[in-house]
Image (cartoon, rainbow, N blue to C red):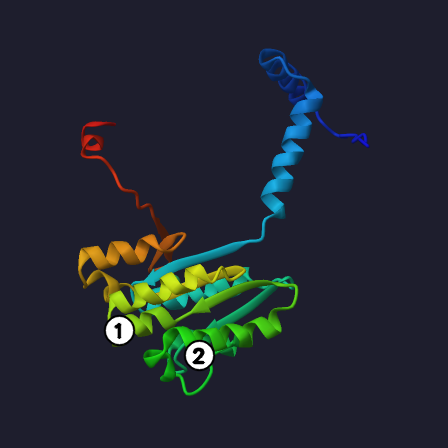
Amino acid sequence: MTKDLLVRGLDEEIHSKLGTVADSLGVSLNSIVKDAVDKWLEQNSQKIQKHELILYQDEKSLSNLLKSIEHVTKDENIFRACCGPKNHSGIQFLEKHGWFNGTIEPFNEFLSKPNQYTAKVLQSIGSKVGKKQLFAMAFMTGHLAENKSVNHATKFCKWYGEKNVPGITHCVAKAETFFSGGVKDMLEFFSIHDQVFIAHDDKLHKLHLSHENVHKLFMN
Ligand SMILES: [Zn+2]
């Protein structure tokens, strides 16, 4: 059974523009509104699931970033969690500000069995999240890359990506660890994350990576 939806408060200009577009497309105003509602529902019914990478230039850049994140994630619907080595300045800052620390001791087990260790961390965090949206800052990948290799970090993040963990997970790591290795490893590592950001001073930059045909060099 269909229901009617009354849209109040559309000003004359918008109503007139809608009418013009509807006429030119040969569709009714009603179908435009239905289409907009369908798209909104589709977009907002999907569970957020992101695995992103944030590389930071230095301690100052990390500190600026964490202060901003700490501020913007203060929301009763967001469950804030972190994990990583306890002597990492990021973990110390977030723990001090009340973030749940899902790290399990002894942390050095992570280097020998990263996947098994992280499965336990996920269980620990999962038991606390409830119906909130998970927002996790993970300092594990960088630790793995520094102590083993970028290739180890790539394999680990591939495994993590396949777990389809609900919510938003940010792998946070020092930029030079990844920029000083081979280009092939670096590109592969970047490509397995949904988005890649670089925190530099007090700015956050987003990297756009795409495989291009050389003809692109001749185009605007
Ligand atoms: Zn990752």
Badge 2: residue crowd in 10 Å (few <14, some 14–19, many ≥20)? some
Q: Secondary structure at mark 2?
A: helix
| Left or right position of 110 against 213 | right
Q: Quadrant of the C terminus?
A: top left
Q: Is residue 99 visible?
A: no
Residue carrying label 1? 146
Residue that appears at 41% across and 82% down = 86
Disc 2 + disc 1, Cβ < 8 Å: no
**Corner quadrant of residue 59:** bottom left
Percent x, y of residue 195 = 39, 52
Apparent side of residue 199 relative to residue 178 in the rendered image (left or right): right
Q: Which element is circle 1 on? A: helix
Measured along the vertical axis of the image, is residue 91 above or below residue 176? Answer: below
Expressed as whole percent of the image width and height from the top left, the position of residue 67 reads: 46, 66
Type of residue at label 1?
Glu
The N terminus lies in quadrant: top right
State the separation of the CA atoms marked 2 and 1. 19 Å
Position of residue 160 relative to residue 109, above or below, is above
Residue closest to the eye, 83 or 120: 120
Which mark, by number, is residue 200? Answer: none
Density class for disc 1 (Cα within 10 Å; few <14, some 14-19, many ≥20) is: some
The part of the image, by quadrant, that contains residue 116 is bottom left
Type of amino acid under label 2: Gln
Q: Could you tell me how many numbered marks the image carries?
A: 2
Residue under label 2, please give it.
92
- Could you tell which of marks 2 and 1 lies nearer the N-terminus? 2
What residue is at 63 percent from the left and 63 percent from the top? 132
